[in-house]
Image: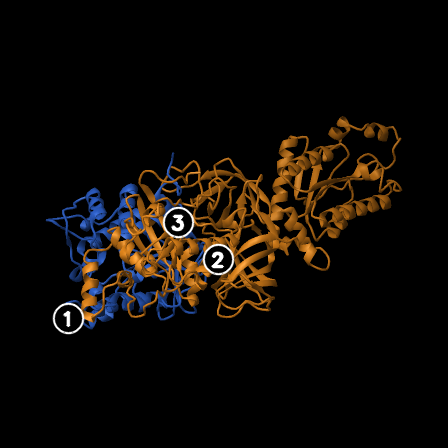
């Protein structure tokens, strides 16, 4: 990880949010910080002093900030703003979030983009509602680096005892949130004590000043060491190239990497990066927007998350989440919202409100709806499968926004995945099975003369699919002959029945989410048409494994042709019984002309094409 | 080690802007990018080409006040060819016939008539639902409150007191009825970032930014109300060195910002960029 404390000048701006109870001195602190770091525009100080003189008011450092954001009249911060300053070490953007609780929305907007937080507590007033509420939100928004500023120490005679009492009380509270403050710095912002300059009146404080503490913060958003998560923003076809566009949200990606796209489970390999004006980079890391071409053209769409097959996100439709709700209308169960998770955008309902948490006391209550500015734990159910991680596994894929009519009304973090069948009554749907297996089911039917190479190809296809993590099974005609079909002979009626039974078995497997590979001579077109009709609910690929009779007879792996020629087997297909070649199979393989490897590629390509063509259908 | 978003400040800004471009292009039906031909606008063109693998997949719009510096018109034609721009040019002919101009009217009126009015007319004509702008949070206090995606009503108004929340890379994805969304990929950039990026990427820009006879333009608008600042910085390296030291605001030379106390907020609430 490249997040070590910077020693030389750091060229990346650090975003810091400043929060705390109203009137605990945020504006004064920020004004003082700007002044003491020499970050004010020329003449600003003089201008504000002059304005104060005209209006007959005593100068306050808070006015500096207010002057910068043109808000003297309203005397409260109306929205999140950015204020820039720099220390010797690096540049900062202070995200100024409001202290009034009705502006929670802006606090969320501000704090969500911060790497670290400063939280002010008035030494005289002590820990208040919003002191607790804001810390709760910081934990919810994933801001982990926190420094608490115990401000207005001048009003408590710089008492170390008062400081220690607040530190103890608030540390205990933070612990219940799983948070820990890096420092509690005693401060008198108004007089610039321990902001940039060390306070002489608090000689007992041996810890850092605010700017020293700031310079020790680390950039927390480097997720390069985590598994790859690349949500697809779009597919571009501006010219002959088909480019998968997306930002690497975690991990890193290189040409040659095998990718799996979830939900859906389709796989391909990164062929190139297509950077303009070039040359293309060799690796795209966290935060980089990538333009990727793939080796195998598979169906990919906006919303899917590309990952390495060895470490994929979860795919599912139900999870427990902690949500903050900002909507004017309360959040209610069984109403359809849109859930946005990275580039995924699906319909979702709140299946259950488990509890509503009071952000300042952390006490929980039961309720049927969630009012504005509340935090709650709920069960979320989506109409289509989504790819996600738990928040503690990978924060960026473990959180989402809830939207109604195009406007974001809330956000949440995913605490726990729910297995749907435990919660849902009724039968397990094929969509649920697909979500679990990560791919759609299908039936691949290999038809052809005995000895044409059906089993050889099917086995090789099975190996490829199995190694790629698919649920795959072979339904082999010879196996069935000695088990399920032991009662059947080779009459036309028996052959029809054998095809019917094989299609039934394949259908059962497909229904449980498998890709079933059927190898059966099935010589008659009418029987095969019936099988296809029986399996109409599933993706179906007919593979005509074609070799001239004399080639098959020459191979005669099982010695059957010899027996048939000697008359020991009656009604042998090709010899004493007809074989009706398929007229329009999905795949036609001349095994006397192509290798097994080539045959396998043909089958897999056709399978992928069919599954891609099914698009949304198989997810419903 | 090659540059990436984690180890390089400018690359991080660039990659984030590209992401914002791409999200806008995927989310909205019809995107347009107003082009002032100024440095920020030219950086946007560069970023758009990076976002879309060399080709900008939407038109650019130049609202021609007819008060541009002559060099800007030359630059426009040159840049059009270099970047393969699909350019729409609009002039408020009606206002010009009515004699609106800097000789007779105040800058706020002229800016409104010659920029905002034809701008709104173009939006009505082409029905764009997303407009990419080059504004930055460090330019001006009212701009510091902006969002990456900022919805505007059908009248073009900006409700800066009730903006949508924006977090975790989720933006307002739907334009208000009859309105549009301003997409602002440069929000996190500073003036210094812009120049350092122009130098690094070698992005074409008008030479008015460089000092002649001890003066240069830091920000470019209509020539009657855009004043050069005292500066010896005659090339890009010198501009960057100057910016690292200066504490004068970038738009100090733009008269329309300074007429009334809250003139910028008023202009912007009415649909100015």
* Left or right, A362 with reference to B98: right
Image coords of residue A306 (percent x, y): 53, 45
Query: Callout 1 environment at 10 Å: few (<14), some (14 to 19), or many (20+)?
Result: few
Residue on which the image places disc 2? A136
Can you say whether A29 is above or below A450 in the image?
below
Name the mark nearer the viewer: 3 or 2. 2
Residue on which the image places disc 3? B16
Q: Earlier in the sequence, mark 1 or mark 3?
A: 3
**Mark 1 to mark 3: distance in Å?**
44 Å
Can you say whether A236 is above or below A268 in the image?
below
On the image, which quarter does residue B143 sit in?
bottom left
Looking at the rendered structure, the number of numbered marks drawn on it comes to 3
Image coords of residue A605 (percent x, y): 61, 41
Quadrant of image for the C terminus of chain A: bottom right
Name the mark nearer the viewer: 2 or 1. 2
Q: Nearer the viewer, residue A162 or A528?
A: A162
Q: Which chain is orange?
A: A
Image coords of residue A428 (percent x, y): 71, 55
Q: Kindly identify which chain the residue marked by label 2 belongs to.
A: A
**Mark 3 to mark 2: distance in Å?**
28 Å
Q: Kindly identify which chain the residue marked by label 3 belongs to.
A: B
Q: Which chain is blue?
A: B
Can you say whether B108 is above or below A509 in the image?
below
At a point 52% along the width and 64% down the height, the residue shown is A358
Quadrant of image for the N terminus of chain A: top left
Residue on which the image places disc 1? B104
- Same chain for marks 2 and 1? no
Q: Secondary structure at mark 2?
A: helix
């Amino acid at each position: 990880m490249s997040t070590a404390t910077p020693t030389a000048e750091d060229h990346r701006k650090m975003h810091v949010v400043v929060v705390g109870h109203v009137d605990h001195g945020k504006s004064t602190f920020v004004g003082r910080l700007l002044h003491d770091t020499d970050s004010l525009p020329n003449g600003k100080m003089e201008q504000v002093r002059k304005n104060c003189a005209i209006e007959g008011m005593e100068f306050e450092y808070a006015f500096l900030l207010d002057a910068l954001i043109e808000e003297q009249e309203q005397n409260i911060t109306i929205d999140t703003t950015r204020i820039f300053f720099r220390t010797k070490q690096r540049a900062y953007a202070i995200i100024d979030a409001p202290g009034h609780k009705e502006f929670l929305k802006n606090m969320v907007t501000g704090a969500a983009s911060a790497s670290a937080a400063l939280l002010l507590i008035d030494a005289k007033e002590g820990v208040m509602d919003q002191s607790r509420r804001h810390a709760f939100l910081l934990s919810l928004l994933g801001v982990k680096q926190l420094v608490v500023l115990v401000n207005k120490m001048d009003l408590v005679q710089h008492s170390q005892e008062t400081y220690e009492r607040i530190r103890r009380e608030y540390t205990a509270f933070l612990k219940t949130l799983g948070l820990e403050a890096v420092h509690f710095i005693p401060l008198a912002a108004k007089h610039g004590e321990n902001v940039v300059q060390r306070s002489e009146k608090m000689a007992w404080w041996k810890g850092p000043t605010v700017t020293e503490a700031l310079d020790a913060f680390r950039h927390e958003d480097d997720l390069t060491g985590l598994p790859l998560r690349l949500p697809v923003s779009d597919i571009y076809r501006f010219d002959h190239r088909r480019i998968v566009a997306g930002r690497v949200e975690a991990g890193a990606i290189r040409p040659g990497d095998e990718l799996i796209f979830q939900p859906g489970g389709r796989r391909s390999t990164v062929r190139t990066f297509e950077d303009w004006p070039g040359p293309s980079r060799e690796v795209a890391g966290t935060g980089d927007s990538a333009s990727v071409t793939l080796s195998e053209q598979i169906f990919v769409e906006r919303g899917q998350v590309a990952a390495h097959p060895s470490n994929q996100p979860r795919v599912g439709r139900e999870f427990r989440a902690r949500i903050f709700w900002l909507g004017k209308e309360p959040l209610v169960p069984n109403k359809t919202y849109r859930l946005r998770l990275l580039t995924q955008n699906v319909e979702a309902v709140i299946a259950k409100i488990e509890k509503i948490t009071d952000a300042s006391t952390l006490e929980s209550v039961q309720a049927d709806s969630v009012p504005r500015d509340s935090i709650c734990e709920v069960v979320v159910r989506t109409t289509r499968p989504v790819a996600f991680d738990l928040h503690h596994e990978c924060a960026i894929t473990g959180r989402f926004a809830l939207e109604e009519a195009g406007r974001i009304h809330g956000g949440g973090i995913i605490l726990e995945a729910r297995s749907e069948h435990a919660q849902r009554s009724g039968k397990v749907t094929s969509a649920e099975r697909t979500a679990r297996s990560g791919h759609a089911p299908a039936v691949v039917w290999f038809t052809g003369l005995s000895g044409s190479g059906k089993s050889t190809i099917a086995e090789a296809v099975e190996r490829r699919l199995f190694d790629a993590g698919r649920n795959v099974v072979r339904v082999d005609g010879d196996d069935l002959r000695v088990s399920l079909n032991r009662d059947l002979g080779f009459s036309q009626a028996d052959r029809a029945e054998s095809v019917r039974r094989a299609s039934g078995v394949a259908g059962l497997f497909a229904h449980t989410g498998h890709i079933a590979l059927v190898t059966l001579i099935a010589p008659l077109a009418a029987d095969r048409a019936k099988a296809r009709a029986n399996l109409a609910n599933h993706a179906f690929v007919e593979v005509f494994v074609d070799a001239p009779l004399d080639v098959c007879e020459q191979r005669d792996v099982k010695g059957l042709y010899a027996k048939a020629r000697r008359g020991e087997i009656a009604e042998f297909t090709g010899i004493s019984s007809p074989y009706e070649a398929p007229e329009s199979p999905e795949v036609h393989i001349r095994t006397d002309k192509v290798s097994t490897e080539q045959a396998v590629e043909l089958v897999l390509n056709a399978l992928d094409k069919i599954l891609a063509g099914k698009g949304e259908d198989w997810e419903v | 080690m090659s540059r990436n978003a984690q180890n390089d400040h400018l690359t991080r800004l660039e990659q984030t802007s590209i992401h914002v471009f791409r999200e806008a292009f995927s989310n909205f039906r019809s995107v347009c990018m107003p082009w002032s031909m100024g440095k920020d606008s030219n950086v946007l063109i560069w970023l758009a080409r990076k976002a879309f693998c060399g080709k900008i997949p939407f038109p650019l719009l130049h609202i021609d006040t007819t008060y541009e510096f002559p060099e800007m018109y030359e630059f426009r034609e040159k840049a059009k060819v270099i970047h393969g721009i699909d350019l729409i040019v609009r002039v408020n002919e009606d206002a010009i016939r009515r004699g609106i101009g800097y000789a007779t009217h105040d800058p706020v009126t002229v800016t409104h008539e010659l920029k905002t009015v034809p701008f709104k007319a173009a939006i009505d004509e082409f029905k764009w639902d997303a407009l990419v702008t080059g504004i930055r949070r460090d330019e001006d206090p009212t701009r510091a409150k902006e969002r990456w995606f900022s919805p505007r009503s059908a009248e073009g108004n900006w409700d800066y007191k009730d903006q949508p929340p924006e977090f975790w890379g989720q933006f307002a994805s739907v334009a208000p009825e009859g309105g549009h969304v301003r997409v602002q990929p440069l929000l996190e950039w500073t003036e210094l970032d812009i120049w350092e990026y122009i130098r690094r990427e070698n992005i074409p820009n008008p030479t008015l930014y460089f000092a002649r006879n001890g003066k240069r333009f830091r920000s470019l608008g209509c020539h009657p109300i855009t004043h050069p600042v005292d500066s010896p910085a005659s090339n890009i390296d010198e501009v960057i060195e100057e910016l690292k030291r200066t504490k004068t605001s970038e738009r100090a030379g733009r008269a329309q910002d300074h007429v009334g106390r809250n003139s910028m907020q008023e202009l912007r609430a009415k649909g100015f960029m």
